[in-house]
Image (tube, coloured by chain):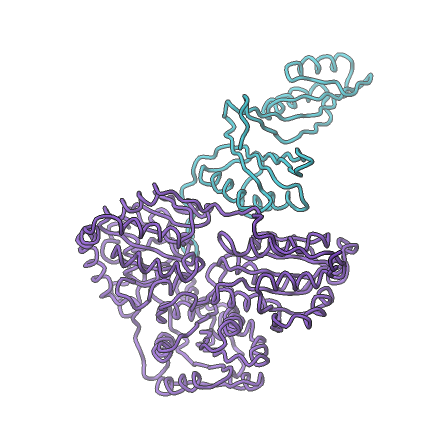
Chain colours: A purple, B cyan
Amino acid sequence: MSKLYSGAEIVFKCLEDQDVKFIFGYPGGAVLPIYDELKNHSTIKHILVRHEQGAGHAAEGYARSSGKPGVVLVTSGPGATNVVTALTDAYMDSVPLVCISGQVPTHLIGTDAFQECDTTGITRPCTKHNWLVKDIKDLSKILHEAFKVATTGRPGPVLVDIPKDIQFAKTNYFKQKKEKKIKEKVHNRFFEKEIDSLIELISKAKKPVVYSGGGVINSGPKASEALREFVRLIGFPITSTLQGLGAFPGDDNQFIGMLGMHGTYEANNAMHDCDLLINIGARFDDRITGKIDEFSPKSKKVHIDIDPSSINKIIKVDLAIVGDVNEVLKATIKKINKKQNGFKNSNKQNTSKWWEQIQKWRLKNSLGFINSDQTIKPQHAVQRLYELTKKQDTFITTEVGQHQMWAAQHYKFNKPNRWMTSGGLGTMGYGLPAAVGVQIAHPDKLVIDIAGEASVLMTMQEMSTAVQYNLPIKIFVLNNQYMGMVRQWQELLHEKNYSESYSEALPDFVKLAEAYGCKGIKANNPNELDSKIKEMIDHNGPVIFDCQVDPNENCFPMIPSGKPHNQMILGPNDKEENKITGKGKALV
Amino acid sequence: MANPKSAYSIPTKIGKFDTHIFVVWVDNEAGVLARVVGLFSGRGYNIESLAVAEVDATKNISRITIVTTGTPQVIDQIKLQLKKLVPVHKVADFKREDKNVIFKEMALLKVVGNKKKIEKTLKACKSFNPVILDKTKQSVVIQITALRREIDKMSKKLKPLGLTSTSRTGAIAMTRGAEVFK
């Protein structure tokens, strides 16, 4: 007769089997048996957050920066509802999370018991799958399957809801059977024929562009290596989505910047005018495509994605390859290398005129801005931060808004998993807790949250978490006193009616930092910026950096609503011709 | 129609709508119907009718038949999204016009009236496999199986004859011939 384990013990046995090192959580009535068991498992460290949303985002930061699934533990009712934003965020950005939530005892489910909510009902549309464990015998199987579902195929969040009586109940523990395959929801079998067609298209292209996305990051560091090899082999220009930054080095000459609503002039024009578009692990998001009808009208389109439902969802493609990015790219590289050596040279000839055109677009310097020696321009602040941190392996998280776009535009990423941002859901308040998670995964690295003052106040309480675990995260607040992106849209689209986008009262961030028990730094003018940034980096502990920036600065370039890629609004440097330039005129 | 103030793109061409019948084999577990139906409502797909029941008690498999309309792109999405659900085993998708597939709906019709009207009713139902489930002096309950539009027609036709209540199932489907959908 083998030993009987309680539900709570089984939870930890599963986590140990899954090699989980950290749990982000917050205790409460319905998970107390699991919290009681925590002390018996020294290999698993619990990180106590200050709000369950923070636990979710911290787990996301942990997962995105380490490639391992993030684990969240919350109680029933409000614990579960508070984590919904983070689950939705993870679902939109394909981040593997396993959320374990407590539930009221089985016999009380459906009675409106204290702290009861229909957790599986609420989280059904924002998870890949969820389970309510009604029988202790199913618990270990479900937990192992939860990890499997979260991490395979297109990753995403899952939730396991465990009633309190199940946590107490006892049964045998079953280890995950390696040989027995749990029914997989991965359909990643691509065919040699498809690779041949891809190479055929590559060899014929005269104006190609590669558009890579977060799928490359999710496929692991090897996929980024494969992407670099592939792009260098074919010599094509490459642009990236917000989530894909870092998969290809940001300072490489073949990289033409981020594309989309706030992408570079050269990237968006290349997307519009190209004759071959190779989408690698991206999903034709509406911030990327602009007006669908006029999206890249002259190109053959190839889409490589692990999720079959991403294909033809928004944009009809000519060649779809369903598979893991790394495997598809490896197979393609292998085939190209087998071909005659002339491939590379003819490719170079074919695309030389295209590169000339791209160089012309680059001369626009679309990320340019008018700097000032009186006030700190936010773009300048990000550029200085980049210059002063690029020598070390730095991890950047962001909140959501103008500062996020400036970070994406002006901070150059050279490695994958160094850039954590809420892209799909656009969750203000993501960056600070995400930085907590990143720092947990990489205790010796520099972790900076490039933040806005409005966003960061949404989850400011997690500074307390950072202080408790002595996590030296740096919160670099670009403080313009406005919800900057809201203000920008109001300026451009709503006749400067700045309705409720100005924060008339803001905390003194230096004093706030001190109240939390960490360091506060304030920079008011450009002259002191560098020395203060250095002071921040050199401080061995968490810092809130209040960077007072020009409140009226807008984020350019920008594709206005309902416009195609080649009708961008450029910055003030380009005022006289900022409406529609070049070839775009013919299309209006 | 175009709203220049939106930060989102403006809806453009809407393609032609087709009617499709999806047959979905799922694990018969708690919440599985909510997952399927939630997928439809969450993504704005339309459900015309729905029929669901367990078909294999040993393997615990239920068969869901959903009639829906959408552009070819939407139909494609529905199929791919359904396949992603964890408890879904397989998904079949048939066009309504497909000659190789049988579609049937069942209806229970209660007609209250005199003998003459009831006789007329039975006559009208003749070609739809009528089964008399209950009969009294003033009423009759008839079961018919037919296509959706045929039942629609019957309802209209029987109104003046004293049709007082109608209860209908959603469509169910099966392929013709010896072949089985895999």
Count numbered badges in the picture.
Answer: 0
Q: Using the image, determine if residue A211 lies above or below residue B101.
A: below
Can residue A497 be seen in the rendering of this structure?
no
Q: Given the current orientation, which residue lies at the most extreme front position?
A: A1
Residue B166 % position (x, y): 70, 27
Side of B137 relative to A306 (left or right): right
Q: Quadrant of the N terminus of chain A?
A: bottom right
Judging depth in this view, the residue of A154 and A261 nearest the camera is: A154
Can residue A293 be seen in the rendering of this structure?
yes
At a point 58% along the width and 45% down the height, the residue shown is B41
Residue A467 % position (x, y): 57, 81
Judging depth in this view, the residue of B154 and A412 nearest the camera is: A412
Residue A232 position by quadrant: bottom left
Residue B109 % position (x, y): 71, 24
Judging depth in this view, the residue of A438 and A12 nearest the camera is: A12
Q: Given the current orientation, which residue lies at the most extreme right position?
A: B137
At a point 40% along the width and 44% down the height, the residue shown is A190
Residue B175 % position (x, y): 55, 25
Side of A566 relative to A73 (left or right): left
Side of B151 relative to A494 (left or right): right
Q: Using the image, determine if residue A564 lies above or below residue A370.
A: above
At a point 73% along the width and 61% down the height, the residue shown is A5
